[in-house]
Structure formats: structure tokens, C-alpha cells
Amino acid sequence: MSYRYEVRLAGEGGQGVVTAGLILAEAASVHEGKNVVMTQTYAAQQRGGPARAEVIISDDQIDYPKVAEADLLLALNQDAYDRYHHQMKRDGVIIVESSRVGGEQADRVMVHKIPLEEISCQATGAGISANFVALGVISGLKGIVSAVSLRAALKARESGTVRTRNLKALSAGFLVGRHMKKGKIAFPVEFRQEIDG
């Protein structure tokens, strides 16, 4: 039986949803040799407008490039959650930014409320890298792609202080996801030397 995993990342312009989708897709395809299709939708002239990236990862040919029911949804704001939380596979996973999403309904899926922006602030000094925290959480919790592949994809795309900051955010998210998988997570998280950047 072939492997196929469908991810929907959604939020608003400026939250880095499309960038996160690109990094996830490149990590899976370039660094892990999987078949990948990514689609994106965003309001190019409107910061704060709806933004979405969909990534399908498979070890077989991908015959249909759209996500109908996601295995995993990342919702970085309330609108994203309201639009897509009902378009999930049974036993799917929803990760939400806890400061922006409320009133979740966990019907057939697992909802994880995570302070992604707060974790980004704690790890990097700014909340702007919450999208990379989220990628790390996805890797640590679900193992869709490895943290090593995500780091390699990020390094290939970014440079300088931006790269350093986002690598720290990615590492912090991976640590959170790994602890969540073990059922040991509590917020706020103390990272200490576990984030190497």
C-alpha cells in the first residue's frame, strides 16, 4: 500500500504560510526523495488576507494535486480554522496557534493548541518565526519529514540572520513536537541549550 500524506497550512498573508509550505515540500522532495506536489493560494496585494499552502507527500505518483481532506491542518488564525477544520480525514491532526484560535471542535480529529508565536519569541526574540516553530512541531510530532531535511531545505533557501533565527525556531518547534509525542509537554517550554540554531 502506497504512502500519501496531505498537509494544509493556512493563515493570513504575512504569517509565512507559503514559505513554510515551500520548505516542507523541498525537504520531502529534494532531501528525502519523495514525490511532492505543492499548491498555494494567497492575496498577493493584501497583507492579512487569506493564505494557504497545500503539500501532498507520497512514495507513489500523485495523480490528483489538491487536498480534499487533510491528514494535518495548521491553522494560524481563526478564519483558517473555521474554513478548514471540517475538511479532515478521520484521526487527522489539527495544530492551531492558541493565541489566535478559540472554540475548537474536535470531531474525529486531534486538536493541539500551541502558543507558536510565544515559542518563537522565547526561542528567537521575535514572534515572526512562528511558521518555522510549526514546521518543527509537525516534524517532531508526526515525523512526516525529518528535522535534518527541514534544516537542509531552510539553509538552502535563506541566509544570514534570518536563517539563524528560523533555524532556532525550527529546533524549538521540533523539541516541542517530540515532547508532545511522548505526552510530556507543558507550556511555557524551557529550551536552555537544546536549541543550537
Image (spheres, helix red, strand yellow):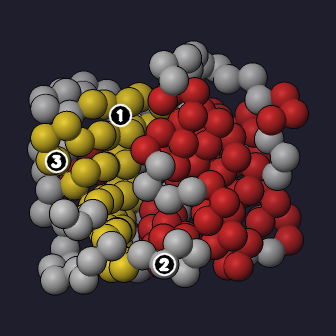
- Name the residue that disc number 3 marks: 88
Q: Residues within 10 Å of mark 3 (few under 14, many from 20)?
A: many
Q: State which quarter of the image contains the N terminus.
A: bottom left
Asked whether the beta carbons under mark 1 and mark 2 sit within 8 Å of each other, the answer is: no
- The residue located at (36%, 79%) in the rendering is 35
Q: Which sits in the foreground, 171 or 115?
A: 171
x%, y% of residue 133? 59, 46
Q: Which mark is residue 101?
A: 1
- Name the residue that disc number 2 marks: 33
Where disc 2 sits, the SS reads loop
In this view, the mark in front (1 or 3): 3
Dot 2 or dot 3: first in sequence order is: 2
User: What's the residue type where badge 2 is placed?
Assistant: Gly
Q: Quadrant of residue 124?
A: top right
- The residue located at (56%, 20%) in the rendering is 185
x%, y% of residue 12? 40, 58
User: What's the residue type where badge 3 is placed?
Assistant: Met
User: What's the residue type where badge 1 is placed?
Assistant: Val
Q: Which mark is residue 153?
A: none
Q: Residues within 10 Å of mark 2 (few under 14, many from 20)?
A: few
Residue 42 shown left or right of residue 67 in the figure: right
Q: How many marks?
A: 3
Dot 1 or dot 2: first in sequence order is: 2
Label 1 and label 3: CA atoms lie apart by 17 Å
Where disc 1 sits, the SS reads loop
Q: Quadrant of residue 118?
A: top right
Dot 1 or dot 3: first in sequence order is: 3
In the image, residue 38 above or below residue 3: below
Where disc 3 sits, the SS reads strand
Label 1 and label 2: CA atoms lie apart by 35 Å
